[in-house]
Image (cartoon, rainbow, N blue to C red):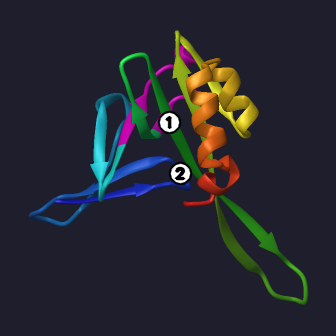
């Protein structure tokens, strides 16, 4: 069975192994799925502060989780009597802990999400760059 995650439309597609038809799996019918070496979870309601959709599980611990929301944006260039379309990838990371989600865009926002000296020391000693991490997709 072939599984395809359409990041642009945020849809999970599967191909039937016998007749090869492609079907869209509804978000409400999925809890999680693995694609290559990545695990994705389905957020069904906005109760966690995250909008419904598929999120990569970057980290899952006892008291917190880190999710990555992947998307693609379509841009058009209609200059010079030609139409050029391109898809640009984007990823936004969230920390979910204590019933709240925190959007992570900088080291400062990561520190505010955890408010923990051990995390602060780790970030400083390893010289983490959140923007560089987000560019991996």
- The residue depicted at 66 percent of the width and 31 percent of the height is 110
Q: Is residue 123 magenta?
A: no
Q: Is residue 3 left or right of residue 9?
A: left
| Residue numbers of the magenta segment | 40-54
Read off the residue under disc 2. Answer: 9
- The residue depicted at 54 percent of the width and 14 percent of the height is 47
Looking at the image, can residue 48 be seen? yes
Q: Examine the rendered structure and indicate whether residue 105 appears above or below residue 52.
A: below
State the SS at label 1.
strand
Looking at the image, can residue 51 be seen? no
Q: Where is the N terminus found, in terms of image quarters?
A: bottom left
Which percent across, then down, holds residue 104?
A: 67, 35
Q: Examine the rendered structure and indicate whether residue 39 appears above or below residue 4.
A: above
- The residue depicted at 19 percent of the width and 66 percent of the height is 20
Q: Residues within 10 Å of mark 1 (few under 14, many from 20)?
A: many
Q: Examine the rendered structure and indicate whether residue 109 appears above or below residue 125.
A: above
Tag on residue 67?
Answer: 1
Asked whether 61 or 85 is in front, the reply is 61
Which percent across, then down, holds residue 109?
A: 72, 30
- The residue depicted at 36 percent of the width and 28 percent of the height is 28
Q: Is residue 23 left or right of residue 126?
A: left
Report the Cα–Cα distance between label 2 and label 1: 18 Å
Asked whether 115 or 74 is in front, the reply is 115
Q: Where is the C terminus found, in terms of image quarters?
A: bottom right
């Amino acid at each position: 069975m072939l599984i395809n995650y359409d990041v642009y439309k945020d849809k999970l597609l599967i191909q039937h192994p016998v007749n090869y038809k492609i079907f869209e799996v509804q978000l409400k019918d999925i809890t999680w799925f693995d694609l290559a070496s990545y695990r994705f979870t389905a957020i069904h309601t906005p109760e966690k502060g995250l909008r419904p959709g598929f999120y990569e599980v970057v980290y899952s611990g006892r008291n917190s989780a880190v999710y990555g929301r992947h998307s693609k944006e379509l841009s058009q260039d209609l200059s010079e009597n030609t139409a050029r379309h391109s898809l640009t990838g984007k990823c936004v990371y969230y920390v979910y802990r204590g019933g709240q989600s925190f959007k992570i865009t900088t080291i400062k926002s990561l520190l505010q999400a955890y408010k923990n000296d051990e995390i602060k020391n780790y970030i400083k000693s390893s010289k983490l760059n959140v923007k560089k991490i987000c560019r991996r997709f």
